[in-house]
Amino acid sequence: MRDYKQMQEVKKLREQAEAEGATPEDTRDEKEKYEKRGPGFRGWMEYIAEYYKWPILIVGVIVIGIFVGISQLAATANPDLSMMYVGPFYMNPTEKEHLGESIAQLSGDLAGDYNQDGDFRFDFLDLTVSHVKDSEGIEYTYDDQNTTYTRFQTELRAGDTLLYFLEPYFYRQALAEGILTPLSELGIDPSLSLDGYGIPMGNLDCYELPGFAKMPAEAVVCLRRSPTSDAISYGRSVEEWEYHRDLLVAMAAYRSANVSPDTEKEPDFTLFYAGEEPIYKSVRTPVEKLLSKLAKDANGDGTTRGVLGDITRSGSVYSSEQIAKAIRTRLVTGSECLFLLDQKAYDYAKENGLLAPLPKELEALDGAVDGMALKLNALPLYNTDGYHELGAVSYMCMRKAPAEGEESYGRTEANFEAALQMFIALAKHKG
């Protein structure tokens, strides 16, 4: 027999159904299912399991999904840093992990935990966009990248990111928006900067660290204005802005153990470079390291130091005509005797009779041109760190000896002899 409590529940169920307008036929199946259950709590559980397990499972999965989502949101809702990269490079998860380790190293005692909540987390938004260059070197995005480009513009106006790593094309647009922090307000060495607002990654010693080293050398790091001075309200607190400021300052202050301590001493030798490729610190350091190794102690200070003097045609605020004039002036009146020149500069030097013939021991080398220059990409030197970034179509050549020119412009026979020995050493360098 069914117990009294069960009979009461069946009656209650029937009355409730009738009150809602259901007919006996509507509730017959449900009533029969319910009346067939066993007595007590166990019977009730069996009834639920047999007839309602799927709705319960579905609701359970939904509830668990909501709980997990809320938990994950809570775990990432308060990152220490929010950064954005825009350009043709994609940073995979492993490289992002390495970047986090480098940030933790730069942040010292805080170990990346700027907000001091016991955990270091950072958001890294990377927007990968293709680009092309026109004849003037101006970069444009492809039409099929419009969605990503729109996201970049939206992030500038209403996004959460505060520290940007931008390809020059996108950096110029961020700069035009007037939302970047002047580096002078942060006490950062102005010589690292392009124009007082951004620093090419290749100019920073921290560019050698894992994660950072995967970015292009020309990627410009810059900081959004503080909320107190930004005309656009972007929902970030002053404290959060300060975390990003402190990281940028630490990036600029980092000094590599690979940099020679003699960088402030008077150079013994200077190689003059003229070309399209920007000379970032990441290029200059290995180039000068080899020059210093091969140089003679010309000034008698007990050390040898070679430096790279340069005028580049790209990335400058000056017009192409002004840059070309500065290169021509340097070739004629500069103190250097050994040159590494792009096609335009080499043609000018050759046509105006400024160059000396190749040393006899170099005349038969691969890449010899016109009896007075060697193509850089034909030499083993081109595969050496730093020199590979100086431009494949570069010509290594020497200025005429002072005794052979109408005016020496301060060059001496000793300068010429030092340049000659350096020319031979670089041309025969095996890497």
Image (tube, helix red, strand yellow):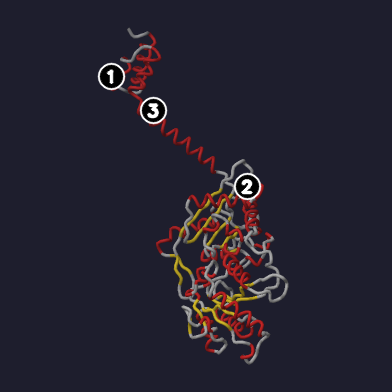
User: What type is the residue that disc 2 sits on?
Assistant: Ala
Residue 247 vs 370, above or below: the answer is above
Label 1, on which residue? 28
Depth check, mark 1 against mark 3: the one in front is: 3
Dot 1, how many residues are within 10 Å of its Cα: few (below 14), some (14-19), or many (20+)? few
Residue 207 location (% of width, % of height): 58, 59
Judge left or right: residue 262 versus residue 26: right
Residue 255 location (% of width, % of height): 65, 59
Give the mark nearer the N terminus: 1 vs 3.
Answer: 1
Q: Residue furthest bottom?
A: 406
Using the numbered discs, state the Cα–Cα distance from disc 1 to disc 3 in whole angstroms.
23 Å
Secondary structure beneath label 3: helix
What is the number of the mark on residue 421? none
User: What type is the residue that disc 3 sits on?
Assistant: Ile
> Looking at this view, is 344 or 318 the one in front?
344
Q: Quadrant of the N terminus?
A: top left
What is the number of the mark on residue 111? 2
What is the number of the mark on residue 56? 3
Secondary structure beneath label 1: helix
Using the numbered discs, state the Cα–Cα distance from disc 3 to disc 2 in whole angstroms.
46 Å
Residue 26 location (% of width, % of height): 28, 22
Residue located at (53% from left, 61% from top): 166
